[in-house]
């Protein structure tokens, strides 16, 4: 992408973002030079969906970047990012929480996690049902995992232009989040919304958006 486009896109998006909403710049598949440009524009939170790619970028970019893992997790690779990852969005099993805890402990860290909720219609989307999330949060075993902190939920809506449907999906997770927050004050973050739907997600309760192509341009291959 032509270089000052990234800066312009970022300025544009940030100028329209409410103060309480955190912008994750989704830089998957993009070269280091693109991330550096966003960094130079003040962006400090980047999202990647492949652990290996995130590690390679972490190694060469400034160390005050907060790295978010937004992709589906392979448990056997958690160890490669445990020393630096700031927030893991896509946790969808208790087994994965245990692995994150184990790897975080080796580095004497507490890793922040979001549980991924399934809100989309599509069968293919990963995620936990609301019942599964409730039972994880209520489980005794969770208390033993001292090196993770569940700070909220992540959801991906159905890939559709139907605004009513998207709104319904975002709102269902927002309502669930608000209900659970009463007994779980550590829940603060609701990660919903991507380039195509982040404004609608914010209107319906999101306080963290994951925006890729609207900042960095289209990706060459779809991931
Ligand atoms: C790629 C990706 C995004 C960003 O998608 P854009 O449409 O490019 O903004 C957000 N969230 C997840 C989980 C992704 O994999």
Image (cartoon, helix red, strand yellow):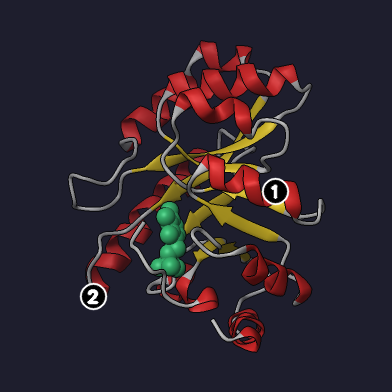
Across and down, in percent, residue 174 comes to: 43, 54
| Residue 71 horizontal side relative to residue 43, left or right | left
Which residue corresponds to the image point at 74% horizontal and 52% vertical from the top-left? 60
Which residue corresponds to the image point at 34% horizontal and 54% vertical from the top-left? 172
Mark 1 element type = helix
Which picture quadrant has residue 80? top right
Which picture quadrant has residue 105? top right
Q: Looking at the image, which is closer to me, 38 or 145?
A: 38
Q: Which mark is residue 75?
A: none
Q: Which mark is residue 161?
A: 2
Across and down, in percent, residue 156 comes to: 36, 55
Q: Looking at the image, which is closer to me, 204 or 64?
A: 64
Q: Is mark 2 within 8 Å of ligand 1?
A: no
Does residue 22 sit above or below 132 in this rendering? Answer: below
Which picture quadrant has residue 74? top left
Which residue corresponds to the image point at 40% horizontal and 26% vertical from the top-left? 93
Numbered-mark total: 2
Across and down, in percent, residue 14 comes to: 64, 79
> Callout 2: 10 Å neighbours few (<14), some, many (20+)?
few
Across and down, in percent, residue 63 comes to: 81, 51
> Callout 1: 10 Å neighbours few (<14), some, many (20+)?
many
| Residue 64 horizontal side relative to residue 222, left or right | right
Does residue 96 sit above or below 206 in this rendering? Answer: above
Which residue corresponds to the image point at 47% horizontal and 78% vertical from the top-left? 217
**Which residue is label 1 attached to?**
58
């Amino acid at each position: 992408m032509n270089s000052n486009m990234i800066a312009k896109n970022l300025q544009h998006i940030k100028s329209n973002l409410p103060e309480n909403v955190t912008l994750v710049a989704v830089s998957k598949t993009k070269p280091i030079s693109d991330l550096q440009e966003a960094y130079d524009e003040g962006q400090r939170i980047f999202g990647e969906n492949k652990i290996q790619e995130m590690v390679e970028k972490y190694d060469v970019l400034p160390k005050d970047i907060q790295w978010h893992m937004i992709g589906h997790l392979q448990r056997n690779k958690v160890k490669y990012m445990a020393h630096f990852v700031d927030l893991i969005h896509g946790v969808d099993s208790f087994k994965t929480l245990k692995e994150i805890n184990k790897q975080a402990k080796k580095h004497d860290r507490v890793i922040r996690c979001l549980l991924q909720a399934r809100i989309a219609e599509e069968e293919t989307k990963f995620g936990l049902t609301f019942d599964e999330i409730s039972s994880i949060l209520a489980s005794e075993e969770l208390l033993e995992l001292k090196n993770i902190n569940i700070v909220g939920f992540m959801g991906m809506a159905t890939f559709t232009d139907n605004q009513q449907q998207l709104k319904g999906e975002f709102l269902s997770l927002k309502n669930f989040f608000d209900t659970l927050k009463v007994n779980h004050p550590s829940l603060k973050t609701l990660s919903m919304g991507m380039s195509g739907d982040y404004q609608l997600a914010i209107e319906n309760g999101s306080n963290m958006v994951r925006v890729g192509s609207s900042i960095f341009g289209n990706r060459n291959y779809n991931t």
